[in-house]
Amino acid sequence: MSVAQAGRIKAKHQRLVLLAVALLVLIGAALLAAWALRNQASYFYVPAEIAARPPEPGRSVRLGGMVTRGSLKTAADGVTIAFAVEDGRARVPVRFKGIVPSLFVEGSGVVAEGRLGADGVFQADNLLAKHDENYVPREMKDMTRDQAEQVMRETK
């Protein structure tokens, strides 16, 4: 056997080495992606969970629950609102500055995206108003079912 033949790797072994390298690269890419996204994940909390185990201040989370009746207050600037979100077991005060969704009212469901402040007030960056399964757009509220179906057919 010559030196040139001894230094060569068999094709079967080349494929195994290539497969091992590809697998390592794939695992490395997955670990890198998981590490990069660890702080980007926005966890969902309800008020009882925030009361029991609050997230660290400044961490981006979502707070979901019902807007407490009688808690909605608008600040003098007209764009900042304060309200409370509850889930029947706990209540979390929330502050939001911006345009409020049209479905946002007291007693309705809401998901607030933001951060819990050191003072215990949730600073919302975004509000998502939830509606029930019986939601009807304002424009169609006074229509009969047949009229609404006619409008839906015309828009298709």
Image (cartoon, grey):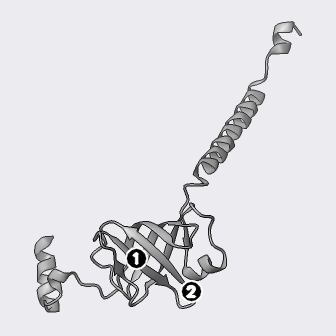
Disc number placed over residue 93 in the picture, else none: none
Of labels 1 and 2, the one closer to you: 1
Residue 53 percent across, percent down from the top left:
66, 75
Badge count: 2
Q: Quadrant of the C terminus?
A: bottom left
Residue under numbered circle 1: 82
Rendered position, 148 above or below 7 = below
Where residue 142 appears, as percent x and y from the top left, is: 14, 90
Residue at x 38%, y 85% (from the top left corner): 108
Crowd class of label 2 (few under 14; some 14 to 19; many from 20; radius 10 Å): some
Q: Which of marks 1 and 2 is nearer the N terminus?
A: 1
Q: Which residue is label 2 attached to?
A: 90
Badges 1 and 2: C-beta atoms under 8 Å apart? no
Q: Which residue lies furthest to the right in this view?
A: 1
> In whole angstroms, how far apart are the C-alphas of marks 1 and 2?
17 Å
Circle 1: element type: strand
At x 79%, y 16%, the residue is 8
Q: Which amino acid does label 1 sit on?
A: Ala
Look at 11% across and 87% down and name the residue there: 147
Which of the 4 image quarters holds residue 100?
A: bottom left
Side (left or right) of 56 relative to 104: right
Q: Of 8 and 41, which appears nearest the observer?
A: 41
Residue located 11% across and 82% down the image: 150
Q: Is residue 11 left or right of residue 90?
A: right
Quadrant where the N terminus lies? top right
Q: What element carries label 2?
A: loop
Q: What residue type is labelled 2?
A: Ala
